[in-house]
Image (cartoon, rainbow, N blue to C red):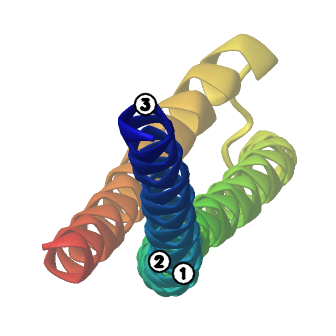
Amino acid sequence: MIVIAFVVGALISVGFSVLYYRKGLSAKQKKLEEDVAKAEEDAERVIGEAQKNAESRKRELLLQAKEEITNAKLDLEKDVRERKSEIARERNRLEQKEESLNRKIEAMEQKESALESRVSDVMALEVKAKELERQKVIELEKVSGLSVSDARNLVLDAAQREYSHDMAVMLKQMEEQAKAEADKKSREIV
């Protein structure tokens, strides 16, 4: 009986041990399951926060990129305006220079025309002088009875003096007019 009691005691003790062991395993398993659930919860929370942070960072980066694009666009527009303004100033300067050159060309053409007119006047005076000379030769031959050669010399001398006088007067007028025009043009240029 002692042996039976001992065996029963041992069996009871083994039974309780198994029971406690199972209970301990069950508690450990429950604790483990709770830890896993908590870890999953923490992981989901961390993932959620990471996604929120990623979305927030994405928005920040998008706003920053939009701001940089806007600034670059404004800088580009400013550069374009400055270049257009510079081109307009250069165009105005060239147009003024062209107008100035056109005025100078027109003035030169007027001078050329005036000189051609004067040359024409001088040639007409020369023709007139020759005609007067011819008429004087005829008159002198009639009146004086001088030889053609002598009369020619007298007439030529008179015509030469008259022609020289007319030419001197005309050249003086041309010179004064050219000086006046040159002074006027130099004042306009300055």
Report the quarter where the N terminus lies: top left
For the residue pair 2 and 127, the one nearer the viewer reads as 2
Residue 118: image quadrant is: bottom right
Residue type at the position of mark 2: Lys
The image quarter in which residue 48 lies: bottom right
Per the model, the C-alpha gap separating discs 1 and 2 is 5 Å
In the rendered image, the vertical position of residue 95 relative to residue 56, given as above or below: above
Can you give x and y, in whole percent of width and height, for residue 154 in the image?
53, 32
| Disc nearest the viewer among 1 and 2 | 2
Q: Amino acid at mark 1?
A: Glu
Q: Secondary structure at mark 2?
A: helix
Residue at 15 percent across and 79 percent down: it is 187
Name the residue that disc number 1 marks: 41
Residue 115 shows in the view? yes
Label 3, label 1: how many angstroms apart (C-alpha)?
55 Å
Residue shown at the point (26%, 65%) measured from the top left: 182
Between marks 2 and 3, how big is the CA–CA gap? 50 Å
Q: Which residue is mark 3?
A: 3
Name the residue located 77 percent from the left edge and 47 percent from the top edge. 123
Which residue is at the front of the view, 167 or 116?
A: 116
User: Pointer 1 and pointer 2: residues touching (CB < 8 Å)?
Assistant: yes
Quadrant showing the C terminus: bottom left
